[in-house]
Each structure stands twice: as C-alpha cells, then as structure tokens.
Image (cartoon, rainbow, N blue to C red):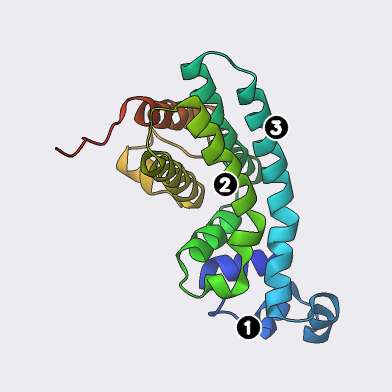
Amino acid sequence: MAAEAEFADHGFDGVSVRQIALRADVPVALINYHYGSKEGLYRAIFEMRAPMIIDQRMAGLRLAEMEPDQERKVEMIVKAVLVPNLHMRSTEKNSSYARILAREVADPKSHHRKVIGEFFDPVAYRVTEALHKAMPDRTIEEIHWGYQAMLGVMVYTMADTGRISRLSAGRCDPEDEMTTSTHLVALMKAALLYGRVPKKD
C-alpha cells in the first residue's frame, strides 16, 4: 500500500497527499474523495490493520484467563501481546505498519489524532488487568512498566530493518517468526515473573 510506505518512511507530517497519490499512481482527488483528508487516509490504515491484531490479542487473553498455572498464564498473556504483531511482520515481509506504529507512539502530536487511544487503549487495559490478576503481588507500577516493556520489544522488533541480523552475524532474524517469538516470549515472561523493583527502606 503506497500510503503505508510513505507514512512509514516520512511520518504523518513528512508526507503530502500529493506524494502518496504519485506513488500510488492515482489522482489526488480520488484519495480525497474516498478518505476526505490525509488524516482520514492515515486512520484508514489503522482501521484496516488494528482489528485483526486486537481480535487475536483478545482471543489469547481469553485463553490465558482459563489457565490455572501462574507461570503458564503469564506466558500466554505475553504471547497474546507479542505474537499477533510478529506474525503480521513475518507473513507480510514488510515493516511499514510497524514503523508507522512506532512513529505514532513517539510523536508528541499523536494525541491530537487519538489513534493509539481509540484503537489500542481498550485492549491495553485488558492486558494490564490480566497481568495484575496473574501476579496480584505486583504493584500497579510494575505491571504497567512491564506492559510498556513488552510494547517496546514488540514495536522495535517489528520495525527492525536488519540491525539485529547484522549485529548477530545473521544468527537473529525477525523474519523467522517461530524463533523470534520463542526468544522474546521467554525473555519477557522471565522479566515479568522474576524481575522485581527493590522495595524502599
């Protein structure tokens, strides 16, 4: 999708509807007719991408809720967060959406567009609630920083354009969904279960 590639490469403010139309080889008027504005086109990307990810994440959380074993439950919650996005990256062989997501999360102006809040905050509350039920001895701060860490791992891995492969001399490849998921899930599970913030005296 031309719009995805342009937004991924240049960010929301760095690209015009004219540039997108040129890349897609369509008239500017056609984009404006269907989407109304650049922001309308931008939001359409999330409207297309987000539901699949969210549905898979919610399904994973429902499975985790039925698991009685704490360690297994936490692992299933981590999988619910990470695996749907990693699967998207692997199947499409394309990091454009991940780079858009990374830009949107980091953009100080993003709160005006309300994309993250509208599409992802509802499921984020479900994830943090599930983590707190699985680890009731953890503080609210530990739960939310743990969730934030998972998001960082997910977005950075999805947006990777070859750096980890270069640094590891080819031994780590984000395109290898199974191996990537295995390593990241194990690391985040261990961090959540065994990483504790020292209590203040």
**Residue 135: percent from left, percent from top:** 44, 27
**Residue 73: percent from left, percent from top:** 53, 21
Instruction: Identify the residue shown where x is 54% and y is 71%.
Output: 110
**Residue 103: percent from left, percent from top:** 50, 64
Q: Are marks 1 and 2 in contact (CB under 8 Å)?
A: no
Foreground pick, 42 / 77? 77
The tag on residue 139 is none
Between disc 3 and disc 1, the foreground one is 3
Q: Earlier in the sequence, mark 2 or mark 3?
A: 3
Residue count near mark 2 (Cα–Cα under 10 Å), binned few <14, some 14–19, many ≥20: some
Foreground pick, 148 / 33? 148
CA–CA distance between discs 2 and 3?
Answer: 14 Å
Q: Earlier in the sequence, mark 3 or mark 1?
A: 1
- For this orientation, the residue located farthest to the front is 201
Question: Does 159 sit above or below residue 56?
Answer: below
Number of residue marks: 3
Q: Amino acid at mark 3?
A: Ala
Q: Earlier in the sequence, mark 1 or mark 2?
A: 1
Give the residue number, with chain letter if any, for mark 3. Answer: 59
Give the residue number, with chain letter if any, for mark 2. Answer: 124
Residue count near mark 3 (Cα–Cα under 10 Å), binned few <14, some 14–19, many ≥20: few
The quadrant in which residue 167 appears is top left
Q: Tell me the quarter of the image containing the N terminus.
A: bottom right
Q: Amino acid at mark 1?
A: Ser
Question: Does 115 sit above or below residue 150?
Answer: below
The tag on residue 16 is 1
Between disc 1 and disc 2, the foreground one is 2
Residue 79 located left or right of residue 138: right
Q: Amino acid at mark 2?
A: Ala
CA–CA distance between discs 1 and 2?
Answer: 31 Å
- Label 2, secondary structure: give it: helix
